[in-house]
Image: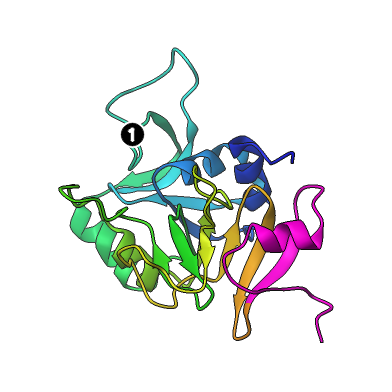
Amino acid sequence: MQKLTRIQMAARLAKDIPAGSYVNIGIGLPELVANHLDPADEILLHSENGMLGMGPAAAPGEENHELINAGKHPVTLLTGGAFFGHVDSFAMMRGGHLDLCIMGGMQVSQTGDLANWSLGRKGEPPAVGGAMDLSVGARKVFILMEHNAKDGTPKLVENCTLPLTGLGVVHRVYTDLAIVDITPKGFLLREKLVDISDDELRACTGATLHFPDDR
């Protein structure tokens, strides 16, 4: 089965961000979304470490390691961009000032519960960062992740078994196979992104997947 690459996944999500939105970009795979935005859309990117107006990744040879995103990778700053401390950054996150947050995920349940900060391994250091604040503070939460884990187990599940980040916070999931909305009925397919049958997609999903023509 041909799956989308990580770059293709990020580019597809970028197409669905409304012009003029204030958007937090999370650590990991979501960082790639910043490289696929149309400047004409005037989307303002927020970074948890204290930046508004963040641009795409810095070009090779032009990195400034004093200018990094929350994932510690060199980025750029758009004209008019601003820096601020963590207090102000988290006030923006918690205060409902962000239209959208894009985060990675380890598991998403059919009711929109999110687990994205720990695999639950014994002795694993905590690494939640601002994920909990973002998951409840942003007006919408989009998750960008592979449809299945490296061992093949589904990441879209009936109930999360990993430590939770937030309850009922996810609105939509973008994977390397499909776009899935969280609805009162559970998982609802919005769009297939690769050549895959309904039965194959259901088999990759750890909970009931509804289709638009379901009755």
What segment carries the magenta color?
A: 187-215
Q: Quadrant of residue 107?
A: bottom left
Q: How is the image coloured?
A: rainbow
Please say if 210 is above or below 86: below
Q: Quadrant of residue 97?
A: bottom left
Residue drawn at (48%, 38%) of the image: 55
Which quadrant would the C terminus be assigned to in this image? bottom right
Does the magenta portion include 213? Answer: yes
Residue drawn at (80%, 81%) of the image: 214
Where residue 26 appears, as percent x and y from the top left, is: 41, 50
Please say if 36 is above or below 209: above
* Other residues around mark 1 within 10 Å, as few (<14) / some (14–19) / many (≥20): many
Which quadrant would the N terminus be assigned to in this image? top right
Q: Compare residues 128 and 17 and report the one nearer the observer.
A: 128
Q: Compare residues 37 and 109 and report the one nearer the observer.
A: 109
Q: Is residue 179 left or right of residue 196?
A: left
Where residue 212 appears, as percent x and y from the top left, is: 79, 75
Secondary element at image label 1: loop
Whether residue 126 can be seen here: yes
Type of the residue with mark 1: Ile
Q: In this view, does 134 lie to the left or right of 146?
A: left
- Which residue is under mark 1? 68
Does the magenta portion include 200? Answer: yes
Whether residue 38 can be seen here: no
